[in-house]
Amino acid sequence: MTLGEKIDRYNELQVIALQTKTEMDELKASITKEMGDEGITKFTTENDVEAKIAEKTYFKYNDELAIIKYLKEHELAGFIKESINTSCMNNELKKKGTLTEDLKGYYTTTTSPSLSVKVVKEDK
């Protein structure tokens, strides 16, 4: 297979994957709604494929500073994690300024190629 053929095939697979994901998302919504409407949380097909619905709870913290203050005041500091905002830090280190030089011994960098494939057509 030539390089051009490989790139074309990769693009075809990207399109198939997107179509498949779209169909799966639609089916998931439909299945979830139907099972909910019927009041069931588990269903097994004739082919022994099982579907389960589990309720997941997500938390969004609106005022993290107030929560941190409360935890510290109530000796619950074990729930607090000190960490680096990696997105901001990475962007700053890419600028190769003073911060990059001062922290050089405290981080490592790796690079890897990133492939982007899309159809390019000229509008005439």
Image (cartoon, grey):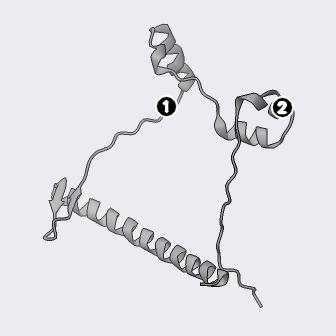
Distance, label 1 to label 2, CA atoms, is: 35 Å
N-term mark: 1 or 2? 1
Nearer the observer, 19 or 113 = 113
- The residue lying at 47 percent from left, 72 percent from top is 17
Viewed as shown, does residue 33 lie left or right of 121? left
Q: In the current view of this chain or complex, which residue is farthest to the right?
A: 98
Q: Is residue 81 above or below residue 101?
A: above
**Which marked residue is nearer to the observer: mark 1 or mark 2?**
2
The C terminus sits in image quarter: bottom right
Per the rendering, the mark at residue 61 is 1
Q: Quick check: 123 left or right of 27?
A: right
- Determine the secondary structure under disc 1: loop
Residue 118, position as x, y percentages in the image: 65, 75
Q: Quadrant of residue 36?
A: bottom left
Which residue in the protein does label 2 denote? 101
Q: Position of residue 71 (x, y in %)?
A: 47, 15
Quarter of the image that includes the N terminus: bottom right
Which label number is shown at residue 32? none
- Give the residue at x 77% y 38%: 93
Residue type marked 2: Glu
Horizontal side of residue 92 vs 110, given as left or right: right
In the depicted structure, whether residue 120 falls above or below residue 68:
below
